Amino acid sequence: MSDLDKNLALVDWLEYQLRQAKNRVRELEAAAEEEVRGRARAETSWVIQPQRADQPAMLHGGSCTLATGKPVPINRAEARVALGESYIVTCQMCRPEMGLADG
C-alpha cells in the first residue's frame, strides 16, 4: 500500500469520525433543548396534591419536589380557581401563588 493510499484511507476514517461526532453533538443539543423545554413547562404548570385524611389538598408548582402521592396536573386557570378554594392550601416552599399573580 502506497503512502497516498494510506493517507486517503486515513482521510476517509477521519471524515467518518467527524460525521459521528457531529451526529452526537446534534443528539446532545436536541436533548438539552428538550430538557430546557421540559423545565420551562414544569415551571409554568401546577399540580394539586390530593387531600389526605389529616391534611388539606395542596397546590404546588409543577416543578416542586415536595408534592407527594399522585399529584394531579392542572392548568393556569384551574390553579387560579384552586387558590380561592378553602380546602386547598398552597405549598410554603415552592409558593405557587407567585407564578399566578401576574396574569
Image: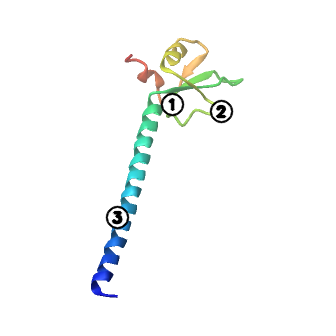
- Mark 1 vs mark 3: give the one in front: 3
Residue 64 point in image, percent of width and height:
51, 34
* Corner quadrant of residue 36: top left
Relative to 39, say whether 6 is above or below: below
Q: Secondary structure at mark 2?
A: loop
Relative horizontal placement of residue 20, taking residue 80 as reference (left or right): left
The residue type indicated by label 1 comes to Gly
Residue placed at 56% from the left, 20% from the top?
Answer: 89
Residue placed at 34% from the left, 71% from the top?
Answer: 12
The residue type indicated by label 2 comes to Gly
- Return the residue nearer the eye: 12 or 48: 12
Relative to 32, say whether 40 is above or below: above
The residue type indicated by label 3 comes to Leu
Residue identifier under label 1? 62
* Corner quadrant of residue 5: bottom left
Residue placed at 31% from the left, 77% from the top?
Answer: 8
Residue identifier under label 2? 69
- Mark 2 vs mark 3: give the one in front: 3
